[in-house]
Amino acid sequence: MRYDVAIIGAGVTGSLIARELSRYNLNVCLLEKEADVAMGTSKANSGIVHAGYDAEPGSLKAKLNVQGNRMMAQIAEELSVPFKRIGSLVLAFDDHDMAHVKALHQKGLANGVPAMEVIGKEQVKRMEPNLSQDVVGALYAPTGGIVCPYELTLGAAENAVANGVVLKLGCTVEDICMDKDKFRLMTSTGEIKCKYVINAAGVYADTIAGMIGDESFSIHPRKGEYLLLDKSQGDIVRTVVFQPPTKMGKGILVTPTVDGNLLVGPTAQNIDDKENVATTAAGLNQVVQGAGKSVPLFNVREVITSFAGLRATPSTDDFVIGPSTVSDKFINAAGIESPGLSAAPAIGDYAAGILKKSGLVLEQKENFTPIRKPVYRFREMKDEQRNEMIKRDPKYGKIICRCESVTEGEIVDCIHRPVGARNLDAVKRRTRAGMGRCQGGFCAPKIVEILSRELDIPMEEVTKMGGKSGILVGKTK
Ligand SMILES: Cc1cc2nc3c(=O)[nH]c(=O)nc-3n(C[C@H](O)[C@H](O)[C@H](O)COP(=O)(O)OP(=O)(O)OC[C@H]3O[C@@H](n4cnc5c(N)ncnc54)[C@H](O)[C@@H]3O)c2cc1C
């Protein structure tokens, strides 16, 4: 197949670039080595839409973070993705921290972050009564927010596909040959020809750039471990609560999630293995200690799961977004560590601008639709809406996941969407079935049955997360 643009990596970066390019009359493909979109860093992070006071003024991180934050509300609405602008606090525990908080405020002003305030102990207490007595003040940024990172990725990918982008899952780019005016991508599923390449391969972006001889940057994984707590803890704080950042990252935060759970973490540990997303006792202890410093009341007995993600830390101090040193038709969107999720909508725009400068003709598509087919979430509906849905389709009257009130109708819908769920974890990310207190103990067997029925495959072929992650080995009688 011949494409105008091939995008490598369907994380939030690649998916939002694909969605942006789907506005134009172009043949675009989005290539992902895993069995679903958002299987890399984009599924395991804090989900914070940063206000933008943290990055160095003048850097791409600063510019794209502030722009992305501004764009997020509209994009989330268009893509039917949960987003809440709940504001953020950076706490100070002593005079040294207070000086840091004031410096962050100055950086924020330089970056164009609106409406920030340095506030004192009493105001912090009024906003967040459950914080430590040791807090002496904070930087308050009302434009900070929270979003579901994998739903944002999925929403963007689905909208891109609905607008004509070809998504190829389970397609690993293994090598790239560069001829004068085109690229040949050797993939695990065959050869792909294209005029332009976007390298959005996360922690592997240096390997992909290396395939055409671009060794201008390297990517080093930095692990962050988290604990997710039950919804009983979800209102212990109302804003995103940070501690002063360090050279290694933004420190341990305590935040509600868009779904009402409490998230605490992450750690920041440089590692060598780009596949190592295991949590450790030492890391999780550090999370408990760190979160307890900000919110002593947080109850570790309410933890329902733990996870870890890898920051794609670049050898440069900034995002690496631009034409490669080898060809101006090979665009890197690399080193997208934090605040990459916040910046992603702006990265989409920015990458399209770079392609245009490199000679790609961007002609608006007449029938582009920015609106993703809405996602109906039964747990969020009023009774009248629920009755209406059940009248239209009785499957919305059958609860499959009791912890999260997810219906059979939602599960069937997520299997038949433009980027349909093909395994148990894919259903979980799309509907929250299995994300509650019992972590799928009750609903997993029922979801296996539904996947088998809807995909018309034997139950033994249904996997947890694609590849060899089988669940059932055979029948006993
Ligand atoms: C602990 C932690 C906390 C964070 N918190 C925040 C936050 O609160 N707010 C924020 O703004 N940012 C945050 N970030 C950063 C944010 O998560 C990332 O910037 C963002 O997810 C990067 O997305 P991406 O698409 O570039 O990478 P990824 O999501 O990793 O996507 C890259 C994709 O490329 C695919 N791929 C790789 N190699 C190949 C190949 N050869 N062929 C085909 N496909 C390939 C991978 O499978 C993967 O799906 C955090 C990051 C971490 C690790």
Image (cartoon, rainbow, N blue to C red):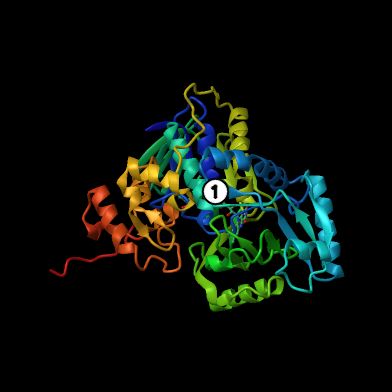
The number of discs equals 1
Which element type, helix, strand or loop, lies under badge 1?
Answer: loop
The residue at the point 84 percent across, 71 percent down is 94
Q: Quadrant of the C terminus?
A: bottom left
Which one is in front, 33 or 25? 25
Q: Residues within 10 Å of mark 1 (few under 14, many from 20)?
A: some
Q: Residue at x 22, y 52 (%)?
A: 457
Identify the image quadrant of the N terminus: top left
**In x, y percent, where is residue 92?**
80, 66
Near-viewer residue (394 or 91): 394
Whole-percent x, y for residue 462 in the image: 28, 57
What residue would you read off at disc 1? 82
Q: Is residue 338 above or below residue 252?
A: above
Q: Is residue 163 left or right of residue 20?
A: left
Amino acid type of the residue that numbered disc 1 sits on in the rendered structure: Pro
Is there any visible trace of residue 245 in the rendered image? yes
